[in-house]
């Protein structure tokens, strides 16, 4: 579904308004984080939902928990 939009000036930046129908189809709302990938060779860009960020603090906590309670976790897994 191709739509044509003009680039507009917003402060010292340029913005492209995304039509409501497209926003709804993609599940994008005000404040939704988006990733912008630029393809200079073909002069286009791709807007997508970014991959979820990994919380390193949670990852460290989980690793320490597993290390500490591994025997108990393995015993529970056998039941």
Image: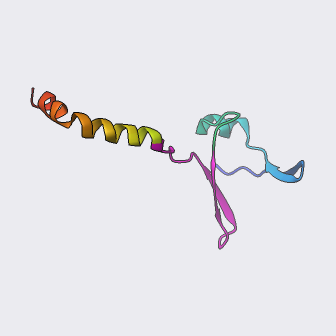
Residue extending furthest toward the front: 68
41 vs 50, nearest the viewer: 50
**53 is within the stretch colored magenta:** yes
Viewed as shown, does residue 64 lie left or right of 5? left
Q: Quadrant of residue 73?
A: top left
Residue 76 position (above or below residue 56): above
* Residue that sits furthest to the left in the current view: 79
For the point 76% across and 52% down, which residue is it? 4
Name the residue: 25% across, 36% down.
68
Q: Is residue 49 left or right of residue 68?
A: right
Q: Could you tell me which residue is drawn at 63 percent across and 46 percent down?
A: 34
From the viewer's side, name the closer residue of 3 and 57: 57
- Residue 50 in the image: state x and y as whole percent: 56, 47
The residue stretch that appears in magenta: 34-56
Q: Can residue 6 be seen in this view?
A: no
In the rendered view, tell whether residue 58 sits above or below residue 9: above
Q: Going by the image, does 66 lie left or right of 45?
A: left
Residue at the image point whose x is 35% and y is 37% from the top: 62
Whole-percent x and y of residue 32?
64, 37
Reply above or below: 46 against 32: below
């Amino acid at each position: 579904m191709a739509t044509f939009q003009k680039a507009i000036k917003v402060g010292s930046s340029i913005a492209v308004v995304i039509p409501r129908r497209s926003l709804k189809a993609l599940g994008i709302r005000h404040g939704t984080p988006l990733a912008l990938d630029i393809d200079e060779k073909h002069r286009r860009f791709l807007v997508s939902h970014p991959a979820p960020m990994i919380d390193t603090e949670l990852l460290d906590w989980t690793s320490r928990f597993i290390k500490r309670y591994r025997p108990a976790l393995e015993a529970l897994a056998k039941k």
